[in-house]
Image: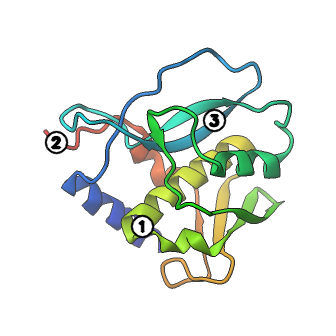
């Protein structure tokens, strides 16, 4: 399963199927959390990251993972980022046991293409790792399959190459 996800991303990257920009810091949040989103850019010749962090204010909810994931799913604030999730995706359930977060999303999540669902999984896993401090994340869609499976379990290491600067168009 992990090989399929990584293969899909590698093929998409070789085709140059994403945009990017770096985050411009509009001031440091006092109670920061890191949300990972897809980056955007109209210049497709620059070296860039595909996924980058948008520092956000926890607004006193740093210890409320359900609140933070709902805030994350609401989308980025900066125009430099794009949510990888289709409209209507919502958090249905969250449990954390023994370093593993189990996240159930609404079925709209599975409306994404293979490439886009892989980017969404990467963003979600990196964000969950950041705000929940877990070793791995199991993602489910309420009543649908993800890659022909009821769930997918991934770790941040599976997506490290997406957060490094990559020149997609040498």
The front one of 116 and 90 is 90
Q: Is residue 133 visible?
A: no
Residue 139 lies left or right of residue 20; in this view the side is right
Q: Residue at x 56, y 17 (%)?
A: 26
Residue 42 lies left or right of residue 139; in this view the side is left
Q: Which residue is mark 3?
A: 34
In space, the residues marked 1 and 2 are separated at their CA atoms by 22 Å
Instruction: Say the numbered circle drawn on residue 61.
Output: none
Q: Residues within 10 Å of mark 2 (few under 14, many from 20)?
A: few
In space, the residues marked 1 and 3 are separated at their CA atoms by 23 Å
Residue 169 lies left or right of residue 24; in this view the side is left
Percent coordinates x, y for residue 153 in the rendering: 60, 68
68 over 2 or under it: above or below: above
Residue 159 lies left or right of residue 33; in this view the side is left
Q: Earlier in the sequence, mark 3 or mark 2?
A: 3
56 over 64 or under it: above or below: above
Percent coordinates x, y for residue 166 in the rendering: 29, 39
Q: Is residue 80 visible?
A: yes
Please tell me whether mark 1 or mark 2 is closer to you in this view: 2
In space, the residues marked 3 and 2 are separated at their CA atoms by 28 Å
> Which part of the image, by quadrant, shows the C terminus?
top left
> Please, which residue is most extreme toward the left here?
170
Q: Are marks 3 and 2 in contact (CB under 8 Å)?
A: no
Q: Which residue is mark 1?
A: 5
Q: Which residue is mark 2?
A: 169
The front one of 50 and 159 is 50
Percent coordinates x, y for residue 6 in the rendering: 39, 63
**SS under mark 2:** loop
């Amino acid at each position: 399963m992990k090989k399929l996800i990584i293969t899909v991303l590698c093929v998409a990257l070789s085709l140059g199927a994403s945009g990017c920009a770096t985050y411009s810091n509009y001031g440091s949040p006092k109670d920061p959390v890191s949300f990972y989103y897809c980056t955007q850019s109209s210049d497709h010749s620059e070296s860039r990251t595909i996924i980058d962090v948008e520092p956000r204010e926890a607004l006193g909810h740093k210890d409320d993972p359900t609140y933070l994931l709902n805030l994350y799913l609401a989308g980025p604030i900066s125009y430099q980022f794009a949510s990888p999730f289709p409209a209507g995706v919502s958090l249905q359930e969250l449990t954390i046991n023994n370093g593993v977060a189990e996240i159930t999303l609404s079925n709209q999540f599975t409306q994404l293409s293979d490439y886009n669902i892989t980017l969404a999984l990467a963003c979600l896993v990196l964000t969950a790792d950041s705000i929940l401090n877990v070793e791995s994340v199991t993602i489910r869609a309420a009543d649908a399959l993800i890659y022909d499976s009821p769930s997918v379990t991934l770790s941040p290491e599976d997506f490290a190459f997406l957060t490094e600067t990559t020149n997609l168009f040498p």
